[in-house]
Amino acid sequence: MSDKKWILLFCAWLVASVSTLGSLFFSNVMNLPPCSLCWYQRIFMYPLVVIFIMGLVPFTPSVLRFSFPLALAGFVTAVYHNLLYYKILPESAAPCQQGISCTSVQIEWFGFVTIPFLSLTGFSLILLCLFILKKEVSRES
């Protein structure tokens, strides 16, 4: 096993862990209620923390088989959420029927860093690590 593969998987785990803790901080400490799409993104993100740590010790390439579908589904959901949030798609396309709207502004740091943006960034970084890891694994095979 090369150190590069382990580091890539560790970086994916780190991003998933920070994302999970960040979402819990927003909802439990800052008392910001999650919208429907945020819940779906949590469903895709939270298991990645466990899957990645199980693939790290000892490193196993099969972690890709379990993590790719979750990361990809989370990425697609995050893209959809951002399209709604930034009014590229009409609000009528939002699945939010109860609770907070998926287009509600809850935080906006530096004029562009929002909760949907943070989610999209997290899933993008995880997918990037997984794509590079897949390339490394197939190169060694």
Image: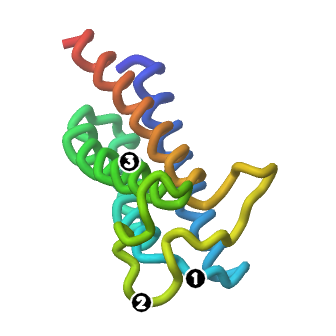
* Image-based side of 117 in relation to 130, left or right: right
Residue bearing mark 2:
98
In this view, the residue in front, 3 or 119, is 119
Q: Where is residue 18 in the image (x, y as percent from the top left)?
A: 60, 55
Q: Element at badge 2?
A: loop
* Image-based side of 58 in relation to 28, left or right: left
Q: Where is residue 39 in the image (x, y as percent from the top left)?
A: 42, 73
Callout 3 crowding tier (Cα within 10 Å): few <14, some 14–19, many ≥20: many
Q: Mark 1 or mark 2, which has the lower sequence index?
A: 1
Q: Mark 2 or mark 3, which has the lower sequence index?
A: 3
**Relative height, residue 106 to residue 67 (above, below):** below
Measuring 45% from the left and 46% from the top, which residue is drawn there?
123
Asked whether the residues under the numbered discs 2 and 3 touch, taking CB atoms below 8 Å apart as contact, a structural biologist would say no
Residue bearing mark 3:
75
Residue type highlighted by circle 3: Phe
The CA span between labels 3 and 1 is 21 Å
Quadrant including the C terminus: top left
**Relative height, residue 131 to residue 83 (above, below):** above
Asked whether the residues under the numbered discs 1 and 2 touch, taking CB atoms below 8 Å apart as contact, a structural biologist would say no
Callout 1 crowding tier (Cα within 10 Å): few <14, some 14–19, many ≥20: some
Callout 2 crowding tier (Cα within 10 Å): few <14, some 14–19, many ≥20: few
Residue bearing mark 1:
33
